[in-house]
Image (spheres, coloured by chain):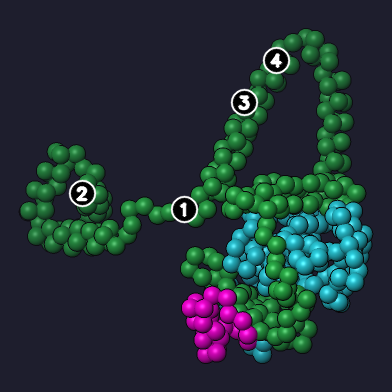
Chain colours: A green, B cyan
Amino acid sequence: MKTPPEDHDLIRWLDEEMTPAERTSFEARLEADPTLKAEAEEMRQLSLSVRSHLPKEMPVPHPDFFNSQIQVRIQQMDLEERRAAARPAAAGSILSSLWMRLLAPVAAVAMLAAGWLALRTSSATGSVVVSVYTPDPKVQATTVENTEAHATVLLLEGLDAMPAEKNVAGLSVHHAETDAQLATTTLFDGAGQVLLVMGKDARNQPLIFSHGTPRG
Amino acid sequence: MRIQAPVTLSLLFAAWCCGVLPTAAQTTTAPPTTAAGKSAATDGKVWGALVYAVTDKSKLTGAVEKAPDLIPDLTDRLAKAFPFTDFEILGQHTQDVFREYESWVVPSPELFLKVDSKGPAEGGGLNLHLQFWRQQTVLVKTDTILRTGSPLFIRGPKWRDGQLIFVLALKSVGGK
């Protein structure tokens, strides 16, 4: 019977992760154990078959966006690390300084005031565009906080105009039903009639099947 | 009936005809379900609209959609953000934001949003990953914190004598 360490060894042997000495030893065991040898051969064939049917490299969809998101995350992590590193040092310097001890009550009041202001600002803050990416290099996106309209505006420059003869259909969606198993969303009007069904293809592109009367 | 992706969509249509996809009669009372057959958890609700903006009222299409109570002063706010005087809502859609599944906000088959929730935001609102699509083409992807009372206006493509604007507003946070 095959024991767990043998399982582990078998996987390492298949993945060619063994040292020459380990490999010689394991192959000697294979010669001594016909059952293990048969299983190893079967798994090796299966592994070769799987590898031959998979591409060595898979293209990342929208690599620019993928990279930009990684960069954002790295910057966030750096910032968090710097903040974490700064906290004990600052606390230590305050505690070690008599002057700072004397100033501590003043600092505490100032920090409370700053926190209160930050809280007020935070609760009053509107929507925020954190990051933006346009796959088409011709299209530029800029964000504007419009306080007068109390709205966040995302301006897309460089978009092709919608053809004038195109009838841009608007929908009045009463409710939607989502089927997670089929990954489809069905939109209904107020009379319970299906307006359209949203789905996705294998490339995650949206698919729309619509009927009804287009408006607009 | 309009077909946008012939091969795959014809399969979708065939599935619908065979009763695999939901129909109105089957689903009007059924809640969204997960693979396990349970109602899908939601993080909130959003309202999306496609707006047509012009500077000459006679150029409007005649659409009669009304702004919801959520943003009764939508026209005034749009006029403060864009150099247009007249606005009309071509289509609108209120949609649950699912916690574990993507949500689609489709006030028009021409311009629509894919919404992925990243959970509640610090200080209120929802962290959302948004994809703004023009049929089969994604125009912009953005991570946005959407807060109630503060809509996101996306200036889309020009159309005829004016501009198409997508409005996304947070209706409520939290859900089942």
> Amino acid under label 1?
Val
Identify the image quadrant of residue B30: bottom right
Q: Chain of mark 4?
A: A
Residue type at numbered disc 4 = Ser
Q: CA distance from mark 1 to mark 4?
A: 48 Å
Q: Position of residue B26 (x, y in %)?
A: 64, 88
Q: Does mark 4 fall on the same chain as mark 1?
A: yes
**Residue B53 disc label:** none
Residue A168 percent coordinates (x, y): 73, 73
| Callout 4 secondary element | helix
- Residue A30 seen by the camera: yes
Judge depth for marks 4 and 3 and give the one in front: 3
Mark 2 — residue? A13
The residue singled out by tag 4 in the image is A93
Q: Residue at x 52, y 78 (%)?
A: B6
Residue marked by disc 1: A60
Callout 3 amino acid? Ala
Residue position for label 3: A85
